[in-house]
Amino acid sequence: MPRPKRIRKMTNPPHFKGYIPVGLPKENNSVVLNYEEYEAIRLSDFELYGQVEAAHVMDISRSTYARIYESARRKVAQAFVQGRAIVFEGGKVYFNSEWYSCNNCGCWFNHPAKEQEIKNCALCGSTDIEQYSDNSQETTTEDICICPKCGNEKEHTPSVPCKKEICPKCNCQMMRKGAPHHHRMRNNNCR
Amino acid sequence: MKVAITSTGNSPESTLDSRFGRCSYFVVYDTENHATEFIPNPNKESVEGAGPASVTLVASKGVKKVVSGEFGAKVKTIFDSLQIQLIVLNEPEKKISEIIDLLNHQN
C-alpha cells in the first residue's frame, strides 16, 4: 500500500472559482487546477518564494512541492494553449487560519475570512485581543523571572529555579518569562 | 447571524459542554431576533465520526460561529473550509445564558 499523501497547508484560498477564455464558445472541457497547485503558483510566482521556503510554508517536502508546481504550470499552459477554462477544485489541502486570544473573556477564536482585518473578540466584542503565534521556543531563552500575579520582573539567578523565587511585592511564586506555562497563564486570564 | 453553542442540558441554565462532537445539546442562537433553539445531539453515543457528523448538523442550521470547549482534529479542517469561525472557551462552568449575554454585548 502506498504511503498516504501528506495534507498540504493552504494559507490563502482563491476567492473565486476559476477562469474562462474570452471569445470562445463555452465548452465543457475545463482544466481542473487543484488548490495545492494554485497555492504553489501563488507562492512561487506571486510571492516569489524559493522552493525550499515555499515547501516549508505548505508543510511538505521540497521534492513534493516541485512536483506540484510542475503539474500546476503544465495545467496552466495547457489551458492557455488549448483555450480551455481553469477551475480551482479539490486537492488534499487544509486551510490554515490564524488564531487569536481575547484577554477579556479568555476565549480563543480563529478567523476564517482573511479578507477583513479582525479587531474585536468574536465572543465578547472586546478590542483587547492578541494574535497567537507559535514562537514560544524563541522566547524561552530570555533569562527573566516574572510574577504571574503582578507582572513584576526580576533577572534570573542561575541554578535557582524561577518557581523557587518569591515576588517581593505580592509573595507569589514566580515563573520563567515566556515559558509555555507562562503563555498558558496569560491566556487563561489569571489575575 | 447564527451561533452554535455546545451545551450539557436543554435549558439556558445548563453549562457549556467542553466537547464538540459528543456534546449533549447544541444551542443555536440567532443574534438578530434573539431566538434560541435546543437540538439534542444524535451523535452523542456514536463510536466513530461524531465530530464530522456534528459539523454537518451545525452547518445545516446555517451557523457562522461555534462556541465549545474543545474541537477535535478532524473537525477543525472541515470548519475552516466551510468558513465557520471557531471559538474555544476553556470555562466549563460557564452557563449558556452567560455566553449569550457575552454575544449580545458585542452587538
Image: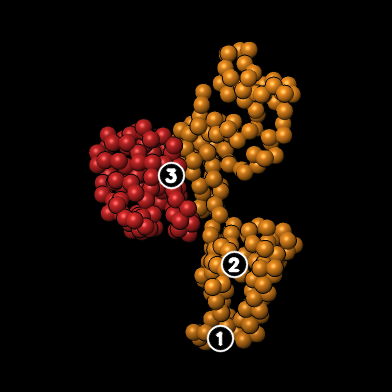
Q: Colour of chain A?
A: orange
The residue wearing badge 2 is A36
Single out the mark in the foreground, 1 or 2.
2
What residue is rendered at 58% in x and 19% in y? A173
Query: Which chain appears red?
Result: B
Specify few, some or many for label 1: CA neighbours under 10 Å numbering under 14, 14-19, or 20 or more. Answer: few
Specify few, some or many for label 3: CA neighbours under 10 Å numbering under 14, 14-19, or 20 or more. Answer: some
Q: Amino acid at mark 3?
A: Glu
The residue wearing badge 3 is B70
Which quadrant of the view contains residue A137? top right
* SS of the residue under disc 2: helix
Q: Nearer the viewer, residue A100 or A117?
A: A100
Locate residue A65, reporting x and y percent: 67, 67
**How many numbered circles are shown?**
3
Single out the mark in the foreground, 3 or 1.
3
Locate residue A6, reporting x and y percent: 58, 64
Q: Answer above or below: position of A190 versus A75.
A: above
Q: Which mark is residue A24?
A: 1
Q: Answer above or below: position of A117 versus A67.
A: above
Q: Answer above or below: position of B100 versus B76.
A: above
Chain assignment, label 1: A
Locate residue B94, reporting x and y percent: 36, 33
